[in-house]
Amino acid sequence: MLRGLITTFKSLFEKPVTIQYPEQRRPVFERYRGRHELKRYDNGLEKCIGCALCAAACPSDAIFVEAAENTDDERYSPGERYASTYEINMLRCIYCGFCEDACPTEAIVLEKIYEMSYSDRHSAIFTKDMLLVKVPDGGQPTPQKTEPGLYTRSVPEMKDPTD
């Protein structure tokens, strides 16, 4: 009994490990997978081309993608198609990262955001508008009007930095 009291008294003088959560936040681990985000190119076009490879790779069937055709008058992404509907059911998602690995354009990324709470099942379904990041500085929002023949590839050609 005396050893137990000694242990208790030692811990009285140690610094507590509690943090005040909303004001102080702990850093997350480097490999942490949190909330999904749909990325954009620098010009504002969406990276998602509606191929649905992320939905095919998802083991919990949490992703739904519906594709539509791009036109020069209404361009959402480079290439022929874009994701007109993109939904992730966060209650089904197991945060495995297979969607991130399957994406050929690196459009879907699991970021470090861990603050997610839902009041009902419907609010746990994240739509494309909720997942899509803001338009970068200098870019234009989608849809964009483009000149014919400007985008002929799903993934734009990258310029050689040595040129």
Image: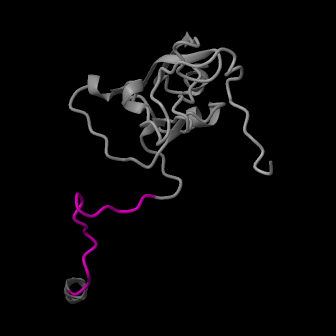
Residue drawn at (49%, 40%), measured in percent from left and top? 138
Q: Residue at x 51, y 32 (%)?
A: 44
Residue 32 lies, with reference to residue 26, above or below; the image says above
Q: Position of residue 22 (x, y in %)?
A: 23, 57
Viewer-closest of 15 and 26: 26
Q: Is residue 83 above or below residue 130?
A: above
What secondary structure is the magenta-colored segment mainly? loop
| Residue positioned most to the right | 163
Q: Position of residue 121 (x, y in %)?
A: 27, 25
Tell me where residue 79 appears, x and y as whole percent.
Answer: 65, 20
Residue 156 can be seen, yes or no: yes
Name the colouring of the figure.
Answer: one colour
**Residue 36 belongs to magenta span:** no
Name the residue located 41 percent from the left edge and 37 percent from the top edge: 134
Q: Which residues are magenta?
A: 13-28
Quarter assignment of residue 77? top right
Question: Would residue 108 be found to the left or right of residue 148 on screen?
Answer: left
Q: Residue at x 25, y 67 (%)?
A: 19
